Amino acid sequence: MLPKINKIGVLTSGGDSPGMNAAIRSVVRTCAFHSIECIGIYRGYQGMIEGDFKEMGPRSVNNIVNKGGTILKSARSKEFMTVEGRKKAYDNLKKAGVNALVVIGGDGSFTGAEVFNKEYGFPIMGIPGTIDNDIFGTSHTLGYDTALNTVVEVIDKIRDTAISHNRLFFVEVMGRDAGHIALNTGIGAGAEEILIPEEDLGLDRLLESLKRSKESGKSSSIVVVAEGDKIGKTVFELKDYVEENMPEYDVRVSVLGHMQRGGSPSCFDRVLASRLGVKAVESILEGKSNFMVGLLNDKVALTPLEQAIKGHTEIDKELLRVSDIMST
C-alpha cells in the first residue's frame, strides 16, 4: 500500500533534451491542479543527495515551455550509485516531506530510479527525455522531434555548399547506439546514403552507392552518419577511405554535435511533454509506481521501468526500404 501522496519531487537527469522544461512545467501545474505540493530537485540525483531542493508553484514555471535545456539543471552522480549515496538522498527526501518522485531522463536515470524504488519502496514515475529516441515503451522521447527538425535544417544549409562546390559531405549526427535520428533526417533531407549502427552497410556498398550517384549525374552528395555506425572507427576515416578510392570527390565532414540537443522545443515536443507530465502525476496519485509514461499509438501509456530499461527499440524496416528507394 503506497503512502498518501502530498508532496511530489521532480528532477531532470542525464543528458538534457528540448522539452524537459515543458515536462517540468506540466508536473508542477498538475500538482497544483490536484492541490499537491511540488519540489524541484536541482542537478538530478546529486542534488537529491545534497538536499538542493526548491518549492515550485504554477508561477515558478512561467515562460519555460519554449526554452531548451532544463531549469533544474542536470548532473551525473557517481555517489548515487553507492548504497550510502542513495541513503543520503532518501533521508533528504523524507526530511523535506517528499513522498514520490517524477524522474525525467533516459535509461541511466531510470536505472537509478528503479534501484532506489527497490531499496526504499519510494513511488516513482519516469518521463523519457533523450533526443536519441532509444527508450523502449514509447514511440517518441522528449526532444527527439526537435532534434530531427534541427538536423534537417542544418543539412539543408550544408547541401547549399555541397551543390555550389560539387562536394561530398559526411554529416555525423548523434546516435551512439541507435540510428533513429540519422535514418529519419537522412530521408527528410534527401541524403544519398544513411549509415546507422543497426545496419552494416559496408565500405564496398558505400562506394558502389556513391559511384551510382556520380554516374546518374549527381555532382554533390550528402551521407548522414550516426555516431555509432560500425563501418569506420570515425567519420574522418570514412572520409579518408572515400578520398583514396574516389579521388574525383572533394570530401568534407561536418559533425553536428551538441547543437542537436539545444534550441526551442517543437510544438510536438511541447504537447508531448505536457501530456506525459499530467499522466505521470495522476498515475502516482492513483497509487501506481515504478512505471515510465510514454506514447504508444498516439496514446499515453505506462510501461514498467524495468521493461523500459531492458527493452530494445527496433529500427523501422519500412523506413530503411523507403531510404533505399529515395537514394535511387
Image: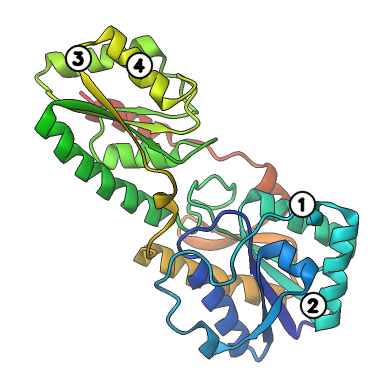
What separation in Å lies between label 3 and label 1 (alpha carbons)?
50 Å
Element class at badge 4: helix
The amino acid marked with disc number 2 is Asn
Q: Sequence-wise, which precedes: disc 3 or disc 2?
A: 2
**Measured from the top left, where is residue 206 in percent x and y?**
33, 16
Count of marks overlaid on the render: 4
The amino acid marked with disc number 4 is Asp
Q: Sequence-wise, which precedes: disc 4 or disc 1?
A: 1
Residue position for label 4: 240
**Mark 1 residue crowding within 10 angstroms, few (<14) / some (14–19) / many (20+):** few
At a point 12% along the width and 23% down the height, the residue shown is: 218
Q: Sequence-wise, which precedes: disc 4 or disc 2?
A: 2
At a point 49% along the width and 64% down the height, the residue shown is: 69
Nearer to me, 98 or 164: 164
**Mark 2 residue crowding within 10 angstroms, few (<14) / some (14–19) / many (20+):** some
Of discs 4 and 2, which sits in the foreground? 4
**Mark 4 residue crowding within 10 angstroms, few (<14) / some (14–19) / many (20+):** few
**Mark 3 residue crowding within 10 angstroms, few (<14) / some (14–19) / many (20+):** some
What separation in Å lies between label 1 and label 2 (alpha carbons)?
23 Å
Q: Sequence-wise, which precedes: disc 1 or disc 2?
A: 1
Which quarter of the rendering shows the N terminus?
bottom right
At a point 71% along the width and 78% down the height, the residue shown is: 53
**Measured from the top left, where is residue 304 in percent x and y?**
70, 55
**Measured from the top left, where is residue 8 in percent x and y?**
71, 78
Element class at badge 2: loop
Q: Sequence-wise, which precedes: disc 3 or disc 1?
A: 1
Residue position for label 1: 78
The amino acid marked with disc number 1 is Lys
Residue position for label 2: 99
Residue position for label 3: 212
